[in-house]
Image (tube, grey):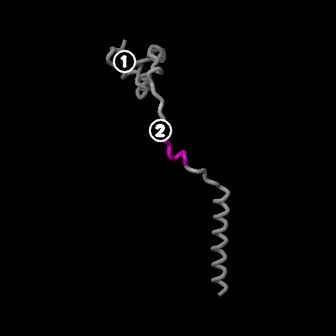
């Protein structure tokens, strides 16, 4: 069995897969550990983290496509008029 002082390190989610492959712990050990954890919902506090990237206005693909077409038409018109001179 695992020493009590190293229990949290062994079941840390960042090393669980490694410990499973090495045979240090089993899936049953993980289930037992998780079920024994206390429910701390009553002691928690919700908070919001601003996500500025999510507040950007959506990019309209229709206007972008029409603007690109307009630019191409204008550049062709200019080159045609220069060629005609």
Tell me which residue sits at (63%, 73%) in the image.
75
Looking at the image, residue 24 lies above or below residue 53: above
Q: Nearer the viewer, mark 2 or mark 1?
A: 2
Q: Secondary structure at mark 1?
A: helix
Tell me the magenta residue range. 49-55
- Which residue in the structure is indicated by mark 1? 7
- Left or right: 49 in relation to 82: left
Looking at the image, residue 76 lies above or below residue 40: below
Q: Residue furthest bottom?
A: 85
Within-10-Å neighbours for mark 1: few <14, some 14–19, many 20+: few
Q: Was residue 67 drawn as part of the magenta stretch in this picture?
A: no
Within-10-Å neighbours for mark 2: few <14, some 14–19, many 20+: few
Tell me which residue sits at (48%, 21%) in the image.
41
Looking at the image, residue 49 lies above or below residue 12: below
Q: Nearer the viewer, residue 1 or 13?
A: 13
- Left or right: 69 in relation to 49: right
- Which residue in the structure is indicated by mark 2? 49
Quarter location, residue 21: top left
Please tell me which of labels 2 and 1 falls first in the chain: 1
- Left or right: 78 in relation to 31: right
Looking at the image, residue 62 lies above or below residue 6: below
Q: Secondary structure at mark 2?
A: loop
Quarter location, residue 33: top left
Tell me which residue sits at (66%, 68%) in the image.
70
Q: Position of residue 27 (x, y in %)?
A: 48, 18
From the image, which quarter does the C terminus lie in?
Answer: bottom right
Q: How many marks?
A: 2
- Left or right: 29 in relation to 83: left
Q: Position of residue 7 (x, y in %)?
A: 36, 18
Label 2 to label 1, Cα distance in Å? 32 Å
Q: Position of residue 8 (x, y in %)?
A: 37, 20
């Amino acid at each position: 069995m695992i020493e009590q002082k190293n229990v949290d390190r062994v079941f840390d989610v960042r090393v669980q897969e490694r410990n499973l492959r090495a045979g240090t712990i089993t899936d049953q050990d993980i289930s037992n550990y998780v079920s024994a954890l206390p429910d701390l919902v009553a002691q928690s506090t919700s908070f919001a983290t601003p996500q500025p990237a999510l507040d950007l206005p959506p990019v309209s693909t229709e206007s972008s496509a029409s603007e690109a077409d307009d630019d191409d038409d204008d550049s062709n018109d200019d080159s045609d008029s220069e060629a005609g001179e």
